[in-house]
Amino acid sequence: MSLQRVIIALTAFAAVAGVLFVDWRFETHIGSLLLLTALSALALAEVYPLLGNLGFRSFPATGVAGLVLLFLARGGLPLAGLDSFRTVAVVLTLFACFVAGPLVVPMFRAGAKEADGREEFERAATTAFGLLLVWFLLSFLLELRLLPMGLSLAVLLVLSVKIGDSTAYLVGRTVGKHKLTWISPKKTWEGAAGCLAGSLAVCLGLGIPFGFPWWGMLVFGTLTSVAGQLGDLLESLLKRRAGVKDSGTLFKEIGGFLDILDSLLLAAPVGYLVAVLLLV
């Protein structure tokens, strides 16, 4: 692992730890909400160009604005006194507006032609797909954070998945010999096993002191690790089809924001489900 990769990882860890400390100290979820919103918006901004490489045009600004508003509504309205049921109703209505909006506006645009309709439907569908891929899946991380003991659960999920990623990288590079899938030739079964071991070590090592049962942590760690690896492969498939190595270049060899969040795309809903059924 290069020095640059280590520096970036430590810097990101320090930033996230600082946000979580503020949340814990002031008993709020605002820090987590703003951090998740910002990272998700930047990841979605990388998704639309990837889909564009595949020939699917979109309305990127509409999609990113929609994601930001949806996250802020879900996390902010409860602070204004709205109960969870009504908050979710508002969020779903907003999502419907951002899906249908690109189709409604052209109805009243001067000079719009009937022949433009197909392109508008395709762009609206692609915009909605991006929202579902990033906002909907990562919204489960916010839902997890809003549960009782949600801060502990969110920390466990993120740490177990990301440390599992790092363990997979190290094990795969040192002893990996058996290729996992054609989607990502560098991934191996040995790395996948290392990922699972790393995730379980985090869940058991931190989850039990947090007050969660050991058997619940075994289930939580196992299922979220598998889901996290599938989320990583899902993004790898998208990048392979789009003909790019990374979703972005901001973090050099690590890639972009989507590369950082990819393993959480499927781990977040799975972790939320396990938490609701077994842990809270």
Image (tube, rainbow, N blue to C red):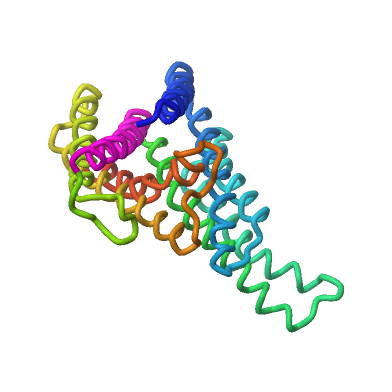
User: At x 55% / y 33%, what residue is drawn?
Assistant: 34
Location of residue 279 by image quarter = top left
Residue 27 visible in the picture: no
Direction left: furthest residue: 215
The quadrant of the rendering that contains the C terminus is top left
154, above or below 86, in the image: above
The rendered magenta stretch, by its main secondary structure, is classed as helix
Residue 85 visible in the picture: yes
186, above or below 72, in the image: below
Is residue 127 left or right of 235 when viewed as pictured?
right
80, above or below 86, in the image: above
Direction bottom: furthest residue: 115
Q: Tell whether position 157 is magenta.
A: yes
Picture coordinates of residue 31, whole percent (x, y): 52, 28
Is residue 122 left or right of 170 when viewed as pictured?
right
Tag count: 0
Picture coordinates of residue 254, whole percent (x, y): 45, 39
In the rendered structure, which segment of residues is drawn in magenta?
Answer: 149-175
Picture coordinates of residue 106, whole percent (x, y): 76, 71
Direction top: furthest residue: 25
Q: Tell whether position 206 is magenta.
A: no
The quadrant of the rendering that contains the N terminus is top left
User: At x 18% / y 37%, what residue is drawn?
Assistant: 197
User: At x 71% / y 69%, what residue is drawn?
Assistant: 104
User: At x 81% / y 71%, what residue is drawn?
Assistant: 108
Judging depth in this view, the residue of 55 and 270 nearest the camera is: 55
Location of residue 212 by image quarter = top left
